[in-house]
Image (tube, helix red, strand yellow):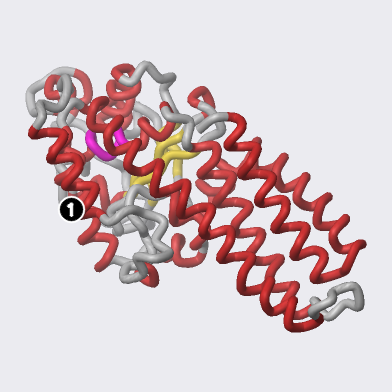
Amino acid sequence: MSFARVALLLAAMTGLFLTVGYMIGGAGGMILALLVALGMNFFAYWNSDKAVLSMHGARQVTEQEAPEFVGLVRDLARRADLPMPKVYIINTPQPNAFATGRNPRNAAVAATTGLLNVMSREEVAGVMAHELAHVKNRDTLTMTITATIAGAIGMLANFALFFGGNRDNPLGIVGAILVAILAPVAAMIVQMAISRHNEYGADAEGARIAGNPEWLASALEKLERGAKSIDNHAAERNPATAHLFIVNPLHAHKHDSLFSTHPATTNRVRALREMAAHGGTGSVAATVAPGGSGAATTAASSRIPSTGAAGGRRRRRGPWG
């Protein structure tokens, strides 16, 4: 996404801050909200990726700790002509993944233990290629800043509901209630528009990076089933980050197509399979196929380390440990 579009997004979010600030404290509240917005924008640019990763309890892993997974990401990043991102694992049984970071040199990709345990190597490759496509397309800055500021707008809107009866507010408590309702909705609409557009683009680019659209199509079907049936408690606590994930992690929105931050999975799968029917592109079969080079050669010796409680034996449910 271009710098101009990022600037427009930040301006829109700042405008929401100013409106809510006015409803809380009139002109003085608007000035205070402007200062908060400027500080929030500065923080979001430099630190929102760390904040999002922390919200979801993501733990960075090295190639020594998880050679198969990190090696696969390294091979895919090389194919995409990208710097190697930091690699994180999130300890939740729901299969999902996201990318974050302000630019390709400061990017991170994260996958859940649920994803790593239920997906084949090819499907993991498809998912991580999709996330690297977000990095390559420079979607991650906008997506991460949106997640951080949208959450803040929601909190500030709640203050408007309780403290919005100031004398400078021409609509009084009615205006405060409207802002409390509409400001988070407006932020969500910005997220929705950005995410839907970005997901289709990342699907296509990810399929080209991985070399086989069917890998991502198959993974999306599993992701959809998993996200609908398995809770992601961290995502439920931080719904403003939902649009970062490859599929919507929130049960509350699974039937809400109007305000969904993601395109319908069936449409995404159909587009990928149409792409495959027309020939697709290249291949990373040598990278991920059993017996191949790179990450696959570590299949017998590497396991994704558990991020749960120490001690006890964890049953291995997939090729990633």
Residue at 25% x, 30% y: name it.
Answer: 68
- Which residues, given as a range, are shown in magenta? 125-130
Q: Nearer the viewer, residue 191 or 250?
A: 191
Image-quadrant location for residue 123: top left
Residue 300 higher or lower than 226, as above or below: above
Residue 297 in view here: no
Residue reaching furthest to the bottom:
173
Image-quadrant location for residue 164: bottom right
Residue at 16% x, 19% y: name it.
Answer: 282
Q: Is residue 254 left or right of residue 237?
A: left
Image location of residue 99, percent across then percent down: 43, 39
Task: Tally the marks.
Answer: 1
Q: Examine the residues drawn in magenta and state their main secondary structure.
A: helix
Q: Secondary structure at mark 1?
A: helix
Residue 229 higher or lower than 69, as above or below: below
Task: Name the amino acid type tagged 1.
Answer: Glu
Q: Which residue is mark 1?
A: 221
Residue 159 higher or lower than 218, as above or below: below
